[in-house]
Image (cartoon, coloured by chain):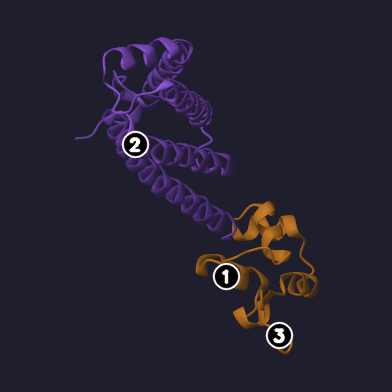
Amino acid sequence: MPIQVNLDVMMARRRIGAGELAEAIGITPANLSILKNNKAKAVRFTTLEALCRALDCQPGELLEYIPDPPAGPDKQ
Amino acid sequence: MPQPAENKPPKFWDERKSILLTRAVTVGVFLICVLVTLGGPGIVDWLIAHGRIALSGPAVRWVMLGLGYLLAVLALWMLWQLFCLLGRLQKGAVFVGENVRALRRIAWCCALAAAICVPAGAALYFPFACMGIAAGFMALIVHVLKNAFAQAIYMRDELDLTV
């Protein structure tokens, strides 16, 4: 997926643990782990808002667009 | 004013009883299928003796028996798949991949039964054709249901990974 969640970077900057953050934003540690490990397929605005509030950051600091590498030349 | 859920009187008919009844009927139909299969030669002889078969000749009996046993295998396997599917529904496992596979197998059983019954009905015994058309229609319905289950599983997986 070209959208990368840089949650672990921001958590390290803010020196906050996964359990503490999960409790602060009101989601389960399992769901936070899904988000942190880039396994999530969608993020609710409410979750994003809670993350930004708890980590004191902007959505752009948490999410990053990394384009997929271009496909190789077609074999003819 | 609506009553709270805990104060509602128990319903006479609920989902659990519905599944139990369907499982019981499935077992009953399975047993009937076994009995009909065991009595296959007698049924074919009766049909031939009473002149219900369009064609005649010594091979007709064996063709009828062969087709009958083939249909019996399909019916028994389909009923077994249905029984297992109902068992999973009873346990609350509704949107799981195994149910989609079971529905696909049931649809294929119905489609194969239709493919056997329609030509047999045209050549040998007309009621077979009616059974074939019903089986073909059932195959289409079950196939649509299978697709709906697959879509529901996909949507649930998407939702599970929405944080």
Instruction: Find residue A8 and report its image quarter.
Output: bottom right
Q: What amino acid is found at the position of numbered circle 3 in the picture?
A: Ala
> Alpha-carbon neighbours of circle 2 within 10 Å: few (<14), some, or many (≥20)?
many
Disc 2 is placed on an element classified as helix
Given the image, what chain letter belongs to the residue carrying mark 1?
A: A
Q: What amino acid is found at the position of numbered circle 1 in the picture?
A: Leu
Disc 3 is placed on an element classified as loop
Q: Are marks 3 and 1 in contact (CB under 8 Å)?
A: no
Q: Is residue B50 above or below residue A55?
A: above
Q: Which residue is mark 1?
A: A48
Residue toward you, B144 or A70: B144
Instruction: Find residue B141 and report its image quarter.
Output: top left
Residue toward you, B3 or B45: B45
How far is mark 3 from mark 2, CA to CA? 49 Å
Q: Which image quadrant: the N terminus of chain B? A: top left
Residue at image position (26%, 18%) is: B51
Residue at image position (77%, 74%) is: A9
**Colour chain B appears in:** purple
Q: What amino acid is found at the position of numbered circle 2 in the picture?
A: Gly
* Percent x, y of residue B14: 34, 24
Instruction: Answer with left or right where residue B71 lies relative to residue B4.
Output: right
Farthest front residue? Answer: B57
Q: Is residue B131 above or below residue B115?
A: above
Q: Which residue is mark 2?
A: B132
Residue toward you, A44 or B57: B57
Residue at image position (28%, 20%) is: B9
The earlier-in-sequence mark between 3 and 1 is: 1
How far is mark 3 from mark 1, CA to CA? 32 Å
Disc 1 is placed on an element classified as helix
Q: Which residue is mark 3?
A: A71
* Percent x, y of residue B93: 54, 35
